[in-house]
Image: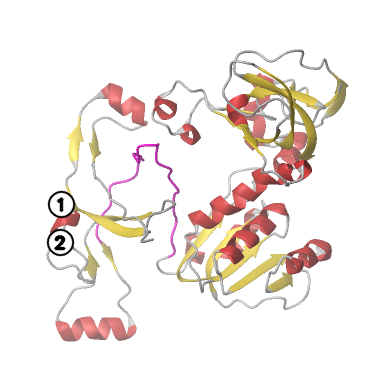
Amino acid sequence: MLACRKIAPEAGLVLAEVPEPKSPGPGEVIVAVAAAGLCGTDMHVAEWHPSYRFMAPSLPVTIGHEFAGWIVARDPDADGPPLGAAVVVMPGVPCGTCAACTSQRPDDCGRRTSLGLTRDGGFAARVRVPITQCLPLPRGVPVDLGALVEPLSIGVTAVDAGDLSPGENVLILGPGTIGQSIALAALDRGATRVVVAGRDDASRLALCRSLGVHVTIDLAEPDAVSDERDFDVVFEATGSASAVTWGLARLRERGRMIVSGIHAAPVPIDLTAMGNGTNLRGVLRSDRDGAFWFRTARPCPYLIPDDGTVGQLLGALGRHPYRPAHIHFIFSAPGYEKLVTQIFIDNSPYLDSDVVFGVKADLIGHLTQVDDAKAAKHYGSANPFLTLDWKFVLSRVSP
């Protein structure tokens, strides 16, 4: 069969005849590919940009990670979709044995392989994949649309990361498939104004308008957009380093920027372009029991903006403008109320005089020092390190 392959650690791809996969192994299926999407990742792979040179030990490999098709052979003893099922294939394959995988956190797997990058993907007539990576398409959904599920999931994840709320203004940089997916997710979340900006890309900007985007901007036109900071959330989906800085400069105070674009090289961030209180955020997923962990720097007290009316009011009250050390959390889960909270660090200055009166006794956590080289290696931390254990409880949505 004909396959699109990356065969050497240099620029270029080849079309090559390769053997069809003969039979699935344990826990595997063979998918007849019905449709596959061309992603920016594939372009970076073709040009052999530095950020994709991790692929070198896996070459040669068939590329393509956005694809859907039909199961034409399967391990009869494996649990999962039946023979003949139309499926979309998830490209990230966790190892199943590391600490993250055994804790039901497959997205955090450090030994994860990728269909189309480090193992054969969907730019071929047939491909062998683990059955656990196959999601059945709902009845009535054309199988070729399944190739859009993976990029659509990127858009939904980006909007989740931005914690978008109804009524907010959104700017999306890049009118391609990822930008369109972000726009659809933002509209679904109730954004009041969704603006998509592109450069000399009339056809895709027109497509964005047909999807319901309120305003499109062609940055190739003179005076296309002002320098006003007018957006609650900016999503970057261009892969252009300059777009990151340009987007940061258009955030409102305490705005959020989510970078979803695929970049060919490290991107310097101009912190001077960030407004006061601009948020840089991480997104975490819990395991099936609701547990999660992450590593971060120890928080410290900080100064709130105290110019103008706020400063005058604090001065009149004889109060300082500081908040004690804390970490913010936002939790969401289907069927539960969203929880927005913060955990304060004991022994932090200003616990008894928080400028916004946010401290409660049951929100103060204790940092415990751990001196354990093995545990430090497991968590990717220096030894010794500090830990904070906390139980968060979500309330079910009322019927």
Residue at the image position 72 percent from the left and 71 percent from the top? 216
Measured from the top left, where is residue 249 in percent x and y?
55, 68
Residue at numbered disc 2: 351
Residue at the image position 59 percent from the left and 18 percent from the top? 27
Measured from the top left, where is residue 360 in percent x and y?
16, 61
Q: Is residue 365 visible?
A: yes
Picture colour scheme: secondary structure
Magenta residues span: 278-301
Residue 330, quarter of the rendered image: bottom left
Tag 2 or tag 1, which sits nearer the N-term?
1
Residue 218 horizontal side relative to residue 163, left or right: right
Looking at the image, residue 311 lies above or below residue 365: below
Q: Looking at the figure, which quarter contains the N terminus? A: top right
Distance CA(mark 1)–CA(mark 2): 8 Å
Measured from the top left, where is residue 101 in percent x and y?
44, 27
- Kind of residue indicated by mark 2: Leu
Residue at numbered disc 1: 346
Foreground residue among 311 and 95 = 95
Q: Is residue 119 visible?
A: no
Find out whether the residues at labels 1 and 2 contact each other: C-beta distance under 8 Å. Answer: yes
Q: Which mark is residue 131?
A: none
Looking at the image, residue 113 lies above or below residue 177: above
298 magenta-colored: yes
Residue at the image position 72 percent from the left and 53 percent from the top? 177
Residue 24, quarter of the rendered image: top right
